[in-house]
Image (cartoon, rainbow, N blue to C red):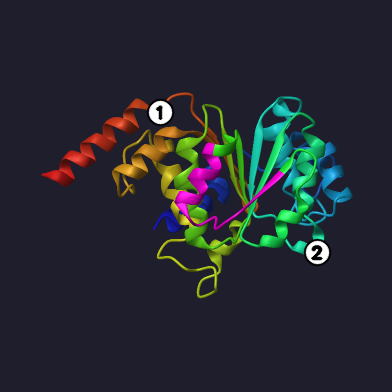
Amino acid sequence: MAKQSLQSTDKALKTKENTNIDSPDLSNNKNLEILKTRFPVGKLDDLAKEHNTDKSSEHHDYTRLYEFMLAPLRYETFTLLELGVGIPSKEAPSLRVWRDYFPNAQIVGVDIRKISKNFEGDRIAIEIGDASDPKFLTAVYEKYKPHVVIDDASHFWSHQIIGLRTLLPLLPPGGIYFIEDLQTSFWENSEYSDAPEDCVSFMLRLMEDVMGNHKGRNISSEEEFNLTSYIDNFFVTRKLIGLNKRSTPHPRAQRAARKLNKSNEA
């Protein structure tokens, strides 16, 4: 239902008579270059290409949004946690990108394959375990206290949702959470569609609640209200979403959660 609502809104916005704002002419190279400067290809993309990770502009083109959101942390001391180390033959390329881009950061990778442990090194630690296990994820968080989490693990619907539900509440104020490869949410009847709800539909419900100031139109539980209370904003591009965590939970969402809880108890 959330996807249909979003599609209807998008269709209306694209209809010229329904808007007073003309879309830029992207056939004009000058306009295209102006748009690119808003999310430029930078140093992070150079490193992604150097280490041959598919996050670069030559593949998924994730590095522009990553650099836009993470550049303020460039020289800070913090921990970055990435779920999913990648194909063993590539020897954890994205972890090496983060290590080189953040010279003062601790980089932690999580993977279910024991061979990934071989890729530990300078400021890179790797934990072996199941990223769909909330207890394991909680233990990893408690050990390293990451400020940034990137989910590039299995891309299964349920795993993406479990990761967010488990780790976002644990992140410190100002923490950042990313989920990659959300195109799998549109691959119905595939190995990734292992749950009744895909991750994009789940995220759209959370987004709707945040944008609607926690009216709870499509929020189904107290836990989901509590989850939206932590979200300050969303940044979305193709196949990738980033969330910033609020400094304090939003009081309106907390009140809605308590109200729903009392209703369920009645």
Label 1's element?
A: loop
Please report the residue visible at 29 percent of the width from the left and 42 percent of the height from the top: 222
Instruction: State left or right for residue 177 relative to residue 62.
Output: left
- Residue at screen point 58% across, 47% down: 16
Q: Quadrant of residue 33?
A: top right
Label 1 packing within 10 angstroms: few (<14), some (14-19), many (20+): some
Q: Is residue 63 left or right of residue 169?
A: right
Residue 170 in the image: x percent, y percent?
A: 48, 36
Q: Is residue 42 visible?
A: no
Q: Residues within 10 Å of mark 2 (few under 14, many from 20)?
A: few
**Image x and y of residue 73, in percent:** 70, 28
Q: Quadrant of the N terminus?
A: bottom left
Q: Return the residue at label 2.
A: 89
Q: Is residue 187 visible?
A: yes
Residues 231 and 166: in front is 166
Residue under label 1, please give it: 249
Residue 50 in magenta stretch = no
Foreground of the two, 70 or 218: 70
**Residue extent of the magenta highlight:** 125-142
